[in-house]
Amino acid sequence: MHIASEMTNGEVRLRFSEDRAFALCDGEAIYPSQLFADLVRAEQCFPSTNGDVLITCKGRYEFSVALLSAWLSGNNVILSPSLHQASLDRIRKIHPIIAELGDGFIKAEDVSLKSDDRGFFELRFCKMQQALTMYTSGSSGKPQPVQKSISDIFTEAFALKEALIWPNMPLIASVPPHHLYGLTFSILLPWVLGIPMVNECPLHAEEVVEAINHVNAGILITVPIHLRALLKQEIDCKPLMAISSAGVLDGDIAMQWQKIFDREIIEIYGSSETGVIAHRQQLNNKSWLAFSEVHIENSKDGLLQVSSPFINSSEGEVFQTQDIVTIQGESQFILHGRADSIVKIAGKRISLLTVEAAIKGCKGVLDVAVMAVPVQGHIRDMAIWAAVAIGEERGVNARSIRMQLLPLLDGIKIPRRIVMLKQLPREKNGKLRKEQLMSVFQNGVKA
């Protein structure tokens, strides 16, 4: 029988039953006794003084051991916005790192542990303990640090447990655990649900399907661009609960998934600073429904303001997003996009998301990102540029795209510059950093 984890007034208690796998590595089960033995081994990685611990493990099991052992030692965890060397070097300059835990950090030694008479292992953490410092994705500028306590992240995980009906099956994710979405849904959520997490992080559609079938996964944590690629594959595991975040889910993806699996994709809306804010199933309702713990309201400028127990006190009592919304009642809203996605060109307000959606609908286009850039002109002071991914598709070029856009968009909305490439340089979490997009325009081929 599974002994549930719980939150009390002052602490978080994680309980792991020995009769249930904690993780699946290459399809092989790892049980809590192995986890706790590895936690004992990990103790030697930390010096006597507390400080910041940088975690770079790619596998979810080793990442979990690193995270738990750092907290048990009273240390704050640092998660880099990416695992690129340049990003890691910047992190090392900013933070006083006392230890780095990367792939293979666990030392193989014989450690024998037994669960107590109740048949489970238990870990306890003070809710007020500082848990980690992570970074925003950088999709709208330079990545910014975000602080999280044990209370912030576990209150969110337990709220998710209660808000949705989760299959009692293994969970697999095509997003890494170094950003809040991957951390919350592919690490913390399996802990509190008591279901096995799949260690690997498959990115290519064929690898995702193989991993799903290998362990009979029942939950997939992913992003829209991965879902689009996945729908081109044959998936035998049904029904599959899919959670999507970190980007806009196109309606055609939602409809195809519903047709194949007879269930809707659940979209999650949130941010690194706020944690989860709302969810929806767009075929049933285009509006977003705020989680019961989250209070929403509008600013004078129509921007969404959020207060919830998932937000660290360092962010203030109310966090103002940069998303434009229309509030409906107490807990629902329509999301219109980011304030910086609405630009004024030649005196006209233009939604970059509308332009992006129109290009996505063009024949041969797999992915697209648009931005407005300053230009010198008698009428325009801004121009729209587009980076368009077409894979191996032939016969698709800037001219064919512009011809398809003519009946759909006013002339001023049609991109002045289009760069064609096989794929956009998105991060593993599906995000596209602003500096990466600018690099595409600087180094790409103008079409």
Image (spheres, rainbow, N blue to C red):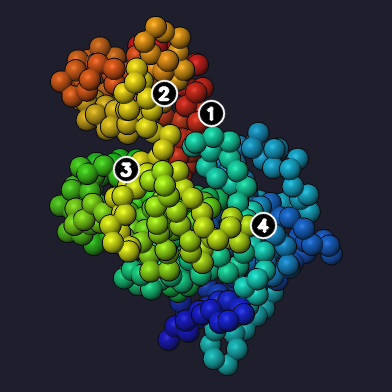
Say which of 79 and 30 sits in front.
79
**Cα distance in 3D space between marks 2 and 3:** 18 Å
Q: Which mark is residue 336?
A: 3
Compared across the picture, whether 84 is left or right of 53 comes to left
Q: Which circle, 2 or 1, is nearer the viewer?
A: 2
Residue furthest to the right in view is: 48
Q: Which quarter of the figure has residue 116?
A: bottom right
Q: Do the residues bearing badges 2 and 3 touch, measured as CB atoms within 8 Å?
A: no
User: Image height check: is 375 above or below 285?
Assistant: above
Q: Residues within 10 Å of mark 4 (few under 14, many from 20)?
A: many
Q: In the rendering, at what x and y percent does residue 5 appear?
A: 50, 79
Q: Which mark is residue 77?
A: 4
Mark yes or no: residue 154 visible: yes
Q: In the rendering, at what x and y percent does residue 333 appear?
A: 31, 54
Residue name at image x 53 percent, y 79 percent: 7
Task: Look at the numbered disc 3 and give the secondary structure of its residue.
Answer: strand
N-terminal of the pair, mark 2 or mark 1, is: 2
In the picture, the quarter occupied by the N terminus is bottom left
N-terminal of the pair, mark 1 or mark 4, is: 4
Mark yes or no: residue 221 visible: no
Residue name at image x 45 percent, y 39 percent: 431
Q: Which circle, 1 or 4, is nearer the viewer?
A: 1
Q: Which circle, 2 or 4, is nearer the viewer?
A: 2
N-terminal of the pair, mark 2 or mark 3, is: 3
Amino acid type, mark 4: Val
**Cα distance in 3D space between marks 1 and 4:** 26 Å
- Circle 2 residue: 372
**Cα distance in 3D space between marks 1 and 3:** 24 Å
**Cα distance in 3D space between marks 3 and 4:** 35 Å
N-terminal of the pair, mark 3 or mark 4, is: 4
User: Image height check: is 157 above or below 120?
Assistant: above
- Circle 1 residue: 435
